[in-house]
Image (cartoon, rainbow, N blue to C red):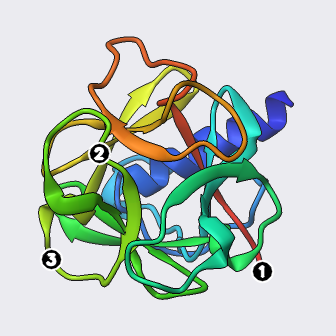
Amino acid sequence: MVKMSAAVVAAAGALALGLSGTATAGAPVPVPEGAAAAAVNVQRVTLRLASDPGQTADVSGASTENGANVIQWALTRNTNQLWEPEAVGGGYYRFKAVHSGLCLNVRGGGNEDGAEIIQWTCGNAANEQWRFVAKGTGYQLVARSSDKCLNVRGGVGQGRNLIQYTCTADGATNDVWLPVWETV
């Protein structure tokens, strides 16, 4: 498990720094001096809970429709659990669902706690842009539109909706994530 955690942290760190090149899932990713010099090709990731890496962000029912909820679900690596990260500038990323081509989005773009996370047509809106904030062995994903964290409603549990919620200072079991590169 320690080997996996090191690989996850290295991969997430490289992703958070916006590095490009090639990497293998589950293998440690060397980050050379001068992060801009590193080369890591991030193609597909699962967004797993740090507190339970067997649970991941999942487009409910593998829907391809705008507005479909994103939930927490057991890791299967199906395409509705795979996300293609794309740097959009300023340290922010958009995550496109592989199965639908739609982006991880805060419904309505509001800044209230409890706003649902859905998939929606990708654009340049702030409510589909996320930045990484390191917390322990994982990362909080913070929405540009609200400065709130990707969170599992009501705590960890399969089938629960993902929402945005005020970030906890030290990270909570339901708001710290492990972006893990996947080979498909």
Image location of residue 44, percent across then percent down: 60, 73
Other-residue count near label 1 (Cα within 10 Å), few / some / many at <14 / 14–19 / ≥20? few
State the SS at label 2. Answer: loop
**Contact, mark 2 vs mark 3 (Cβ under 8 Å):** no
Q: Nearer the viewer, mark 2 or mark 3?
A: 2
Of the two numbered discs 3 and 1 on the same chain, state the one appearing first in sequence.
3
Quadrant of the frame with the N terminus: top right
Q: Residue at x 46, y 87 (%)?
A: 101
Q: Which residue is mark 1?
A: 184
- In the image: residue 4, left or right of residue 104: right
Q: Inspect this view and state whether residue 28 appears.
A: no
Q: Amino acid at mark 3?
A: Asn
**Disc 1 to disc 2, C-alpha distance:** 31 Å
- The residue positioned farthest toward the right in the image shown: 1
Q: Residue at x 54, y 39 (%)?
A: 177
Instruction: Provide the residue designation for mark 3.
Output: 124
Question: In the rendered structure, which disc, 2 or 3, sits on the residue that comes first in sequence?
Answer: 2
The residue under the point 14% across, 42% down is 111
Which mark is in front, 3 or 1?
3
Question: Does residue 103 appear left or right of residue 159 in this picture?
Answer: left
Q: Which mark is residue 115?
A: 2
Badge 3 marks a residue whose secondary structure is: loop
